[in-house]
Image (tube, rainbow, N blue to C red):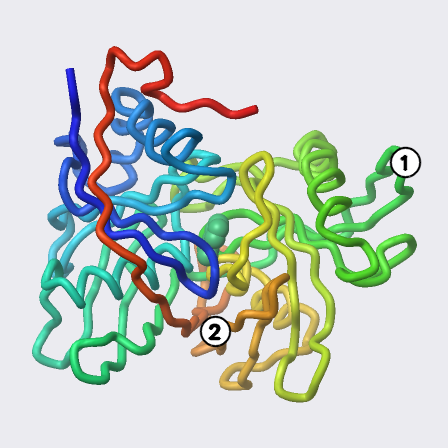
Amino acid sequence: MRHTFFCIDGHTAGNPVRLIAGGAPLLRGASMSERRQDFLTRFDWIRTGLCFEPRGHDMMSGGFLYPPTQPDTDGGILFIETSGCLPMCGHGTIGMVTFALENGLLQPREDGRLRLEVPAGIIEIAYTTEGSRVTSVTIRNVPAWVAKTGISIDVPGFGPLTVDVAYGGNFYAIVEPQGNYRSLDDLGARRILELSPIIRDLVRKAYTPVHPLDPRIAGVSHVLWAEPGENPAVQGRNAVFYGDKAIDRSPCGTGTSARLAHLWHKGIVRPDQPFTHESYIHSRFTGRIERETMAGDQPAIIPLITGSAISTGFNTIWIDREDVFHAGFQV
Ligand code: PYC
């Protein structure tokens, strides 16, 4: 049996985004968080089929648009990615909103904004246009905070590291320059890919963060290697590791949110201070702390993340359930 998915492919700051505009399965659930659980239980082959080889690759990421479940929202997003269905994805949101607006799949409100439900909560969207092109998207993200500081681990073949854990829509282990980690370019992509899963495992053994308002969001999923920016216009650079083999080509929206919370916690970035974040490939997002808030009993911030996306084409993909690789594969 053949399932057909109509996709708009593109990228946000270099990282792939596949908006699946047709072919979404009907999901059960009274919120996008419940629908995410239902999708993972009944339809995960669609995610792996569209994200893994031979239809995807190690960095593949995207999602589906759904009708809203919450009052006063304009739609819901279910993210899919090689690692699973993220509670929130910043580069994915910027890309999906750009492609959806450019193709009439989302209708803005009278004030030109959108309120969208993602599994991690409600986010708000503002955007700019030039003609029919969406030129930038700003996300008012879910609250971000520091969950734990000073986790000491000993990484075989590398040495001791102290990492902090922060939330920005996903939980990040944040590694700042120290000891044998001098800079991103000194470490290099191959070493980042080798060391990150080991670091993630060690941090997972030491500590399990749980979202105070939604216990379905738990555990460190990403590793963010941080370094200061290289020129006065750039305040930070990162390499975000996700899935099993991916370095985010974008500066990572939820990673930038977690890093803003981290730098705020350390007293380095204050509300309203601009924070330009570069990715491993030097593409940029602009971040800003809109205000301080609480997430349950956690002091937190509301991050604003701005970036832009470009579509690269329409892509009609079908998955034939008789194909031995219908659910994709990873090597
Ligand atoms: O932009 O939030 C993000 C993201 C998460 C994983 C890859 N990108």
Residue at 91%, 55% in the rendered image = 179
Report the quarter where the C terminus lies: top right
Compare residues 245 and 198 and report the one nearer the observer: 245
SS class, disc 2:
strand
Residue at 70%, 30% in the rendered image = 205
Count of marks, rendered view: 2
- Few, some or many C-alpha atoms within 10 Å of disc 1 (few <14, some 14-19, many ≥20)? few
The three-letter code of the residue at mark 1 reads Gly
Q: Quadrant of residue 215?
A: top left
Residue at 34%, 27% in the rendered image = 49
Report the quarter where the N terminus lies: top left
Q: Is residue 84 visible?
A: yes
Whether residue 148 is situated above or below residue 25 in the rendered picture: below
Residue marked by disc 2: 292
* Marked residue nearer the N-terminal end (1 or 2): 1
- Residue 282 point in image, percent of width and height: 60, 70
Give the left or right position of residue 247, taking residue 68 as reference.
Answer: right
Q: Is residue 299 visible?
A: no
- Residue 211 point in image, percent of width and height: 47, 44
SS class, disc 1:
loop
